[in-house]
Amino acid sequence: MLVKGRMSAPIISTTPETQIMEAMDVMKRNNIRRMPVLNKKGELVGIISDKDLLNAAPSNATSLSVWEVNYLVARIKVKDVMTKDVLTIPGDTPVEEAAYMMSNSKIGGLPVTQDGEVVGLITETDLFKLLVELMGAQSDGVRVTAVVPDVLGELDDITHAISKAGGHFVAFGQFDADDTDHRIVTFKVKGLKQDEVSAALTPCVDKITDMRRCCTSS
């Protein structure tokens, strides 16, 4: 899956000359937490987040009068508080690379560019939604987490065991274990009861660390 298939588009943007209270209002009305900042030519010159705007506004504990506060706030513009060195990402980048970039850089969103133009925004919320889908969070079934040997054919053994027992997968993921000789697999299965899943998996896995029935209606 590529970034262009999960990004938010069309983008909601702002300009460097926009007053911060106006930018905050746009974010609130559109229920977003960050906006690309584009100049008059449509070029990306920065990115602004709700935290940037809130940090720029005077504290409630200020001794200034409301008139003084309004005067000062009116003088603060997006260009004064935006992040100018912006990381961007092409739309044809795999989503896991976007997640890796965001995690390493400790940022919550990346403008998506094509031919030098901002065409979207991929955010941590977009990636959270993807995780919900990948792990089948909205589907009923038996959810299993197990430790398996990191050997060729192990996942094939698991899928065949579940299929032979009459079940089918609605989600499947694998993750690093505490040692390099094992992997952790987490998956959700429909069509089987917990004891049936357990019986099918016992010959295939080293240890089942968690098993539960997940029902979206509960």
Image (cartoon, grey):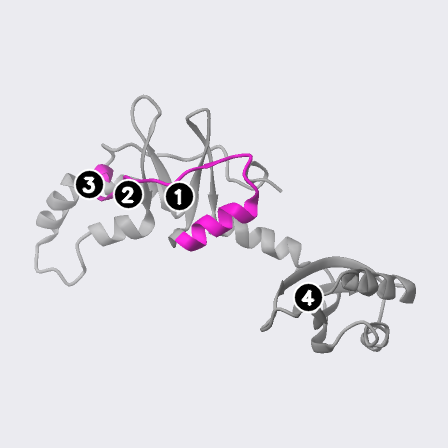
Label 1 belongs to which residue?
Answer: 29
Give coordinates of residue 139: x percent, y percent: 72, 59
Q: Within 10 angstroms of label 3, few (less than 14), some, or many (20 or more) residues?
A: some
Disc assigned to residue 80: 3
Disc nearer the start of the sequence (1/3)? 1
Task: Give residue 136's quadrant in the image.
Answer: bottom right
From the viewer's perspective, is residue 153 above or below residue 22? below
Label 4 belongs to which residue?
Answer: 186
Q: CA distance from mark 3 to mark 2?
A: 9 Å
Q: Is residue 145 visible?
A: no
Give the magenta range.
77-104
Disc nearer the start of the sequence (4/2)? 2
Q: Secondary structure at mark 4?
A: strand
Give coordinates of residue 170: x percent, y percent: 75, 57
Q: Quadrant of the C terminus?
A: bottom right
Disc nearer the start of the sequence (3/4)? 3
Q: Residue at x 41, y 51 (%)?
A: 108
Q: Within 10 angstroms of label 4, few (less than 14), some, or many (20 or more) residues?
A: many
Q: CA distance from mark 4 to mark 2?
A: 38 Å
Q: CA distance from mark 3 to mark 4?
A: 46 Å
